[in-house]
Image: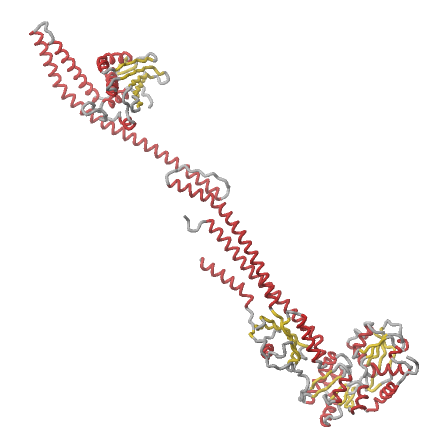
Amino acid sequence: MLKYGLRIKIIACFFGLILLMGILITAMVRQKISTALREQYINKGKNLAVSINAQGEHLILVDDMIALQGLVDEIKLKDNDVSYAFLVGNDGKVLAHTFDRKFPDKLLAVCAAGPDNNVILLDTELGMIRDISVPILNGKLGITHIGISEHGIQVAISSVTFIIIAIVLAVMIAGAITAFSIGTLITRPLRQLTTAAQEISMGDFNQQISIKSKDEVGTLTAAFNRMSKSLEEQREKIIALGNEQSQLQAQMFQQEKMSVIGQLSATIAHELNTPLNTILLQAQLLKEELEEKSPKGENGPGDIKMLETEIARCKLIVQNLLDFSRQPFNEKEPADMELLLEKTLQIMKNEFALRKIIVSRVIVNKLPEISANVNHLQQVFLNLLNNAMDAMPDGGNITITSGYIEDDNAIQIAIKDTGTGITKEDLKRIFDYFFTTKEPGKGTGLGLPICKQIVNDHGGTIDVQSEPDKGSIFIIKLPVNGERLNG
Amino acid sequence: MRTAGISFILALLISVTGCGQSEDAVKISLLTGSGKTAEYARTGNNEKIRIAIGAMISPRKTFVLYENLFNFIGKELGQPIELIQRNTYTEVNYLLKENKVDAAFICSLPYVEGSKDFGIELLVAPVCFGKPEYFSYIIVHKNSPIDSFEGLRGKTFAFTDTMSNTGALFPIYSLARMDETPMSFFREYIYTYSHDNSIKSVADRIVDGAAVDSLIWEYENRNNPVYTSSTKIICKSEPFGIPPVVVPAGIDPVLKEKLKTVFLGIHEKEEGRKILSMLMIDKFVEIDDSRYDSIRTMYDFTASFKPRKKQ
């Protein structure tokens, strides 16, 4: 995911550091040891040369070259580090040497032309050799040369280097393990943070990481937790604000819609009122005419009377429409809801019988009088009962339960049916204007919205609980003192 | 920035690791040579005047002491001098006999022998403490109870060279006079081949007594009394002719004259005087052969001596 993770970087740093230190230490120790060993070997060579001189100068002085040859041979034989030994007289001629017969002439030239210091490094077929020269009797008798092989030094340096490299490797492995552990330790909370931050970017704001340390990482985690919490709170506020706004919008839309409906209703009602009056007047005239023609007439006047009643009902509906458009409805008076329910049921008695519907009344306790517009509330009851009947085309039961709820100082009337029920989607919209599930021509989509409007006008609430094929229950709550109920 | 850092580290590493190899080695083959064996360079050089010194003191001391004198003589002669030393008087006498040296500082007894056997001639002789004479000292450790030569009977003794006058002939002669030989008189005796070795042997109590050259004992006692201070003289011989400078029998007379002139004139020059004073030599003088007669007497007596008493 990341090109170079923190852990890799830490390990790389450790590795690099140890490697660097290792190289530096190896180089320095090598140098120190080689310097020390070289000095030691040079000293050894000098001491050997001095010891040759101690006896050699006597042998030179008495011209005992055979003994001198024996002396250098012995020195070479005794010490493996001695590659060669030879003595040069003060006239520049070789007095004795340990080379097998042939003396390398160039060596003499190199030593003679060498630098002032008495040690010269030679690169020979026998390896690196350090030629150490010590003058015999202050140089008056000549110079003794000892060739000390560097082989011993190189072997010692190699073994020391090997040991150091082994140690460095061991330290590197230990370092890698340590770096891996430290890396894991440091990056674990960081990885948690990364995961949490990704969750936040996906929209899940409520991310809390447990804080285990009190260091910088711990501080960072704490800050992250605070940020996450604050984000979540902000979001909740925004959602709440949005809800409120959308509610307000819905309310405004509702009011606007109501206003249009009101105007429309007023116009229609007004327009209908005139022809209805005319029809009613004509019906009354027709009735009087029929009464005059057959004073104790058979069926005529009765049928006309029914016509007259229905026209009156039409006028009432028109009146209701006018009333509806003329909001708010202020004409309230103390009313007995039980009585109103009884009246309503009485009106619908024939209809119930016709549709094979059995109505049950459950009175939990006596309802107090409430301030209400009786006509409007009857319209609500009629509407709900009609809906219940429509939901039960093959008949069923309607149960009307009423009671006083002391805690809310309100009355509650529940109308339950055993009908087809309402789907979850429809349930959300049943109080919307012009929403209907009934066949075209049967429902206006105004029934339940008007019911809700009326109940709201009384400061009450209307709720519905329903499931498909399990029937529905509409619950109306109305305040006793006219104060608006919550919910 | 990063590149700079890496370069710095690399430079550091190179400098650190490179230090050891900074030394330049001279490439050379040790297996190919001229085929020459070691040249014993110090023989057969004809350009130098070869002067030998008998081993009165150790070759190293001799070299150090006589170097300046030889350089001076070489300068006076206009020819470099080569100093020749041998372990024993016999070897030096052999060089004289074979004409392998041009001159030699030898002990008095080798002169007596050499003049008799192969005709070596006196060139000059040094004058020390005013006279061309010297003595044989019989010395013992300074804490030793022995106070006479006789007291050394049954003790250990150090001679110098068999051909030394003071270090051998005189004590042997003295013993012969007592009808004794070293073998009969001493429990054990050794030859040290130089007077300073003999002094050291007594000082270190390696031997109970020794016979040494008076000139050397006095010289050491004056300049470096480390060993002489631990010894004491219990017997002093009669004076003998001082160890001379001799030339072989067949020497070029011109060279002999040249050499003699140089030797006799050393003390006349400031530098020469200085060198001579360091050697505790006043000057070089011509010396008569008769001064060595006493040694000849001792030599003859000793050579023919047969102890009468049973060994």
Left or right, A306 with reference to B306: left
Examine the rendered structure and indicate whether residue A5 appears above or below residue A122: above
Asked which quadrant contains residue A410, the reply is top left
Q: Is residue B254 left or right of residue A271?
A: right
Residue A482: tell me if it is visible. Answer: no
Picture residue at 34% right of the left edge, 34% below the top: A239
Above or below residue A184? Residue B62 is below
User: What residue is shown at x 39% (from left), y 36% (from top)?
Assistant: A232
Quarter of the image where one finds residue B187: bottom right
Residue B277 x %, y %: 76, 82
Residue drawn at (62%, 71%), measured in percent from left and top?
A148
Quarter of the view holding residue B54: bottom right
How has the structure been colored for display? secondary structure
Provide residue A415's location: percent of width, then percent of height.
29, 18
Q: Position of residue B181 (x, y in %)?
A: 88, 80
Residue that lies at the very extreme toward the right in this rendered image: B309
